[in-house]
Image (spheres, rainbow, N blue to C red):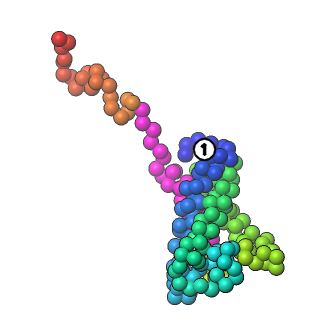
């Protein structure tokens, strides 16, 4: 966006896209890392379903409506939640001039999500409120997941910088007929 709307509603509207992209790319990372480490694509994606189904949910290995789709839906909702904060942070910063300036708020948001998920969520009181995939993946894999989440958050802003939205006016879409006649050099007589 050229001039982003600096309101909560604007941040929420933008977060629906950036959060969706972050959710999809981080879920792809979860699946690939699940296959690499566990030989199970769905196992890490099932993790967040522990919010509903309990502590056994992260240990479900296979794709299912009950665990995988619910796990993805919870992960997606959490991604959009964090994307709201990312978009609000972007509103407070000057327009990004470089790729690093676009990535910085995304990295800060992903780091905050990681800290809340694994260091500030009280495990004794609410162990089910962690993402769940930490029970199945190694620490390096978790860092990869959160890094892809950051890239997903920044993805829409990076694309917007590369391909700014086009604004069409009536003159740019189709020139007026009289203007086209003058440019062509063809003389037309009025009857």
Quarter in which the C terminus is drawn: top left
In this picture, is 16 found above or below 128?
above
Instruction: Name the residue that disc number 1 marks.
Output: 4
- Please say whether residue 29 is visible from this viewpoint: no
Q: Residue 70 location in percent, x, y?
A: 59, 72
Range of residues picked out in magenta: 145-169
Secondary structure at numbered mark 1 = loop
Q: Residue 24 location in percent, x, y?
A: 53, 67
In this picture, is 71 found above or below 5?
below
Q: Is residue 128 magenta?
A: no
Q: Residue at x 38, y 29 (%)?
A: 171
Q: Residue 34 location in percent, x, y?
A: 55, 82
In this picture, is 185 found above or below 65?
above
- Callout 1 crowding tier (Cα within 10 Å): few <14, some 14–19, many ≥20: few
- Secondary structure mainly formed by the magenta segment: helix
Q: Residue at x 65, y 46 (%)?
A: 9
Q: Residue at x 55, y 56 (%)?
A: 17
């Amino acid at each position: 966006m050229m001039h982003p709307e600096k309101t909560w509603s604007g941040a929420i509207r933008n977060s629906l896209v950036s959060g969706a992209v972050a959710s999809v790319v981080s879920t792809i990372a979860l699946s690939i890392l699940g296959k690499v480490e566990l030989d199970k694509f769905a196992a890490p994606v099932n993790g967040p379903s522990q919010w509903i189904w309990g502590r056994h949910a992260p240990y479900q290995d296979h794709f299912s409506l009950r665990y995988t789709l619910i796990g993805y839906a919870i992960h997606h909702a959490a991604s959009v939640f964090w994307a709201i904060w990312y978009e609000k942070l972007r509103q407070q910063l000057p327009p990004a001039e470089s790729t690093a300036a676009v990535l910085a708020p995304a990295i800060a948001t992903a780091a905050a999500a990681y800290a809340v998920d694994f260091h500030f969520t009280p495990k004794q009181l609410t162990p089910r409120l962690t993402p769940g995939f930490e029970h199945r993946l190694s620490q390096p894999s978790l860092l990869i997941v959160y890094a892809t989440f950051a890239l997903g958050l920044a993805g829409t802003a990076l694309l917007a910088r590369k391909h700014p939205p086009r604004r069409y006016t009536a003159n740019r879409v189709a020139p007026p007929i009289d203007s086209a006649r003058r440019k062509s050099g063809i003389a037309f007589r009025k009857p």
